[in-house]
Image (spheres, grey):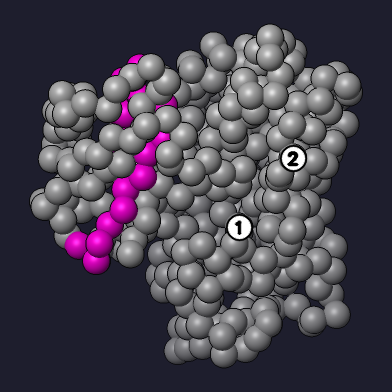
Amino acid sequence: MTGDFMALAELKELQQQRWLEQVRYVETSSPFYQGLWRGMTPPTQLDDLAELPLSDKAMLRTSQQDHPPFGNYLAAPEHLVSRLHRTSGTSGQAMNLALSVHDASQTAMIGGRAQSAAGLGPGDRVVHCLNYQMWMGGFTDHCTLEATGAMVIPFGVGGSELLIRTIQELNITAISCTPSYPKVLEQTIAEKFPGLSPRDLGLRLGLFGGEAGLDDPAYRKRLEDTWGFGVRNANYGVSDVYCNFAAQCEHNNDLHFVALDVLYPELIDPDTSEPVDWQDGASGELVLSHLERQCQPLVRFRTGDIISLTGVSKPCVCGRTAPRFRVIGRSDDMIVVRGLNIFPTGLAATINTFKQLSGEYRVILDGPGPYDLLPLDVEVVDGVEPTPGLAENINQAIKRDLGATAHVILHKPGVLPRTEGKTRRVIRQ
């Protein structure tokens, strides 16, 4: 039985067994953690893991700067590195991610569980539209899709017109992409395929990842109504840890954490770093520790993602015992406006209640903050005039829902850029 269906008591025992081996390996093989834990004896019991200091992305960046190309948290000999990926570097220095054969195989297996939970399986033909150029989301996510037994068409990014024809010619049943990409395809269909609607393509499943947005019921319904497919957040992960270890199933809009047998999660208060009990209703920053990793094992790694636990003690209707959670936002995307913490997910939920808006928006921040006003650029749909009255209605809705005062600038259709990869909603200048 796979880790997402195992009884929680069995999983806890398995986690403990694997931690005993992993902590010995990290303690003897990772110069990074040897330095971080200097003077400490790491606990042998997972329940005592909070005794160890936290690690974070900034530490890993410094490690790779000082010890290129993999950093001194590479615990395996370099000859065991069989694959290298690189992060996009959109929020800082690009990182080199090293995988051994074992690490790559396990990554595909865990991601395959997530994609399977989302409904993909044998008999499906899925076109994968994420960037294959070194980014983890391309080739590695391709492998997770293959692990479900589905046929995978490696399309990548760009060539939207060719993609539409490919979906038609190959009778493709599912698409894997970012949540913002369908809007790009809708525009291509409208311009290049007169008389064709997105529903006419016959896709039954949309598998999304890489961006926030699907927690918003209005945006999800818009995708379902426009395309006629089942909408799943099927690809939640943290590149430095696992590219995909959580997904939604058809019965539940919360994410299933399908990697408990190889990944130990904790919650902490993002401000104080104090532990938060792992129980239903708890919220905090997600912290992760590998239980079986060769190349770049991480222990108590701060992900920066703020999550809320929604189902820890009871299995889902789908039968998975995997804990369920929702992503509230990222600590580095959080905008502080007059003492209020604003996340893009909450902002998008309010914007998508306006049928006059396309759903495209940008928050362009000048300086480090905090801010008195939320600077917000939004875009209207065809046939709608960008009037001061509409801008004020949007501002009032944001004030009502989020408590903040916004400076709303309306744009005509097509002004804000569309992207085929990850869309940056919060831009800090």
Start-end of magenta stretch = 345-369
What element does badge 2 sit on? loop
Expressed as whole percent of the image width and height from the top left, the position of residue 423 reads 50, 46
- The amino acid type, in three-letter code, at marker 2 is Gly
The image shows residue 192, relative to residue 266, as above or below, that is above
Residue 194 as seen in the image, left or right of residue 330: right
Look at the image and say whether residue 101 sits in the magenta stretch. Answer: no
> Which of 245 and 280 lies nearest the eye of the viewer?
245
- Residue at coordinates 81% horizontally, 25% vertically from top-left? 165
Image height check: is 264 above or below 235?
Answer: below
Q: Residues within 10 Å of mark 1 (few under 14, many from 20)?
A: some
Query: Marks 1/2: CA distance?
Result: 26 Å
Looking at this view, is 181 or 283 the one in front? 181
In this view of the protein, which residue sits in the foreground, 398 or 260?
398
Residue 159 disc label: 2
Q: Does 20 sit above or below residue 17?
A: below
- The amino acid sitting under disc 1 is Ser
Q: Residue 366 location, x and y as percent?
A: 25, 62
Is label 1 or label 2 in front? 2
Q: Residues within 10 Å of mark 2 (few under 14, many from 20)?
A: few
Q: How many marks?
A: 2
Q: Which residue is mark 1?
A: 239
Q: Report x, y in % for residue 213.
A: 45, 34
State the image quarter where residue 274 is shown: bottom left
